[in-house]
Image: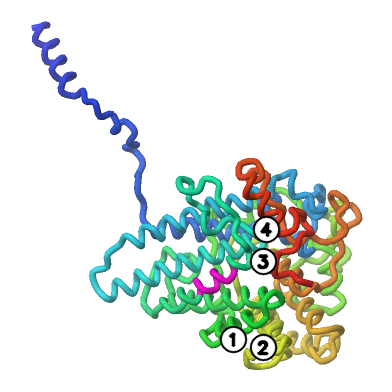
Amino acid sequence: MKKIVLLIAFIALSVSCTDDITGLNVDTKNPSTTKSEYLFTSAQKALVDQMTSTSVNYNVFRMFAQQWTETTYPDESQYNITTRTIPDNHWTVLYRNVLTDLKAAKKQLDAETPASPAETAILNNKKAIVDIHIVYAYSILVDTFGDVPYTESNDIEGHPQPKYDDAKTIYKDLIARLTADASLLTSTDSFGSADLIYGGSAAKWKKFANSLRLRLAVNLDDADHAYAASQITAAVTAGLISSNADNTNLQYLGAQPNTNPLYVDLVASGRHDFVPANTLVDKMNTLSDPRRAKYFTLASDNTYKGGIYGTGNSYTNFSHVSATIESPTLPGTLFDYAEVEFLLAEAAAKGIAVGGTAESHYNAGITASMQNWGVASADIATYLARTDVAYTTATGTYKQKIGEQAWLALYNRGFEAWTSYRRLDFPVLAAPAGAYNGLTSVPVRYSYPAKEQTLNTANVTAAITAIGGNNLTTKIFWDKF
């Protein structure tokens, strides 16, 4: 009997043996494929999280725009962004967490074969919406660093050390892609509930695409006025975000890990690292701005008081971020109606035919911001009537008028507040006395990631030469003045 058992075991072993052992590499407990919807949702949330976060490891744009400052550790408001490798983290999130998933989703969608005209329309919508997100991510990378990998990016097998493309060339290609994407979008469905922002509404993504086209063209104007003007008017004709109902908001949930990242940084962490900056609070006090109660709390002396920008501050002595902003369900915003109106005001002030006047769009931008924050209509009217706010009587050129009011309206949207400041040079912001490495002006870009400088040395070196240096003061190509 023992011999029979051994014989059976030997036969079984012989049958099971094979030269092909590749099956041993298959993880039978985890899926090897996924759906385009899952990839899209993951990338979309990672993108909004990055643009919303105030983690000093990832996003310090509120400090660069001098809307917030720090308490115990003022490093980032003093422009030290290398100790925590902030450029590396920003770069990694956008290239790895966002663009990799979006391009994988696009590849899956390209492989689908729709069975009907209706399915074809839905598939085209999905492809366009994915590409719009890709364009947005690249635009943020360009506006942060300047020249970046584009045509060879996210291709580890074909281009493990991707070249850096010219930023202006990238910009124009992004505008062309947005134009094509918007033309593909129809009124049919797309991602449905997998789209955390617009619930699959192709009509709203079309407005977003045109509005992003407007933003890029306005940024470009000082570098290529004729081209920018034509793109601005075309974007307006194609249809923009036209009310706060169109705002590009991702609605967060009440429980981690799906809360607004600000809730994690400001509340769940138990830390008190940030207070509103005096640069912003003082300006709003001067104007008796009714958004103060929406943006901040009162300080212990019953006034609105900002911490001294770029120094250590006692958390208890100053106004704090409002309960609205600390809410776990506060939406994260990529674009809003107020920004559209300020972009149109700027274009109109330069003589570009966008319909309306610089003054009408300026007033609409202020109104849109205040309505979005729940300011009463009577308070909005009072504010617009102030001689230091009204477009015809406020101090300065159009750049100062629009720049200062856009900066106030873009509160809690640090990246675009910083971009508006860089483009218009208003409000006037000064580097703090203790700025890192003796900087005497506010940064206008991030330096390239340290890892890129180590792993992709030749291409980074070429990019640094092309843009004129790797400093925080090296201007992005569109920042001409």
Q: CA distance from mark 1 to mark 3?
A: 36 Å
Mark 4 vs mark 3: which is more N-terminal? 4
Choose top left, top right, bottom left or bottom right for residue 129: bottom left
Q: Which residues are magenta?
A: 171-178
Q: CA distance from mark 2 to mark 4?
A: 28 Å
Q: Quadrant of the N terminus?
A: top left
Q: Residues within 10 Å of mark 1 (few under 14, many from 20)?
A: some
Residue at 52% x, 75% y is: 209
Residue at 46% x, 48% y is: 158
Q: CA distance from mark 4 to mark 3?
A: 32 Å
Which residue is tagged 2?
352
Judged from the image, the secondary structure of the residue bearing numbered disc 1 is helix
Q: CA distance from mark 2 to mark 3?
A: 37 Å
Asked whether the residues under the numbered discs 2 and 1 touch, taking CB atoms below 8 Å apart as contact, a structural biologist would say: yes
Does residue 259 appear to the left or right of 79 in the view shown? left
Residue at 84% x, 79% y is: 287
Q: Which is more foreground, mark 4 or mark 3? A: 4
Mark 2 vs mark 1: which is more N-terminal? 1
Q: Nearer the viewer, residue 49 or 126?
A: 126
Asked if residue 172 is among those painted magenta in the image, a careful observer would answer yes
Which residue is tagged 3?
324
Which residue is tagged 4?
145
Amino acid type at circle 2 is Ile
Asked if residue 460 is among those painted magenta in the image, a careful observer would answer no
Q: Nearer the viewer, residue 180 or 319?
A: 180
Residue at 74% x, 62% y is: 321
Which residue is tagged 1?
233
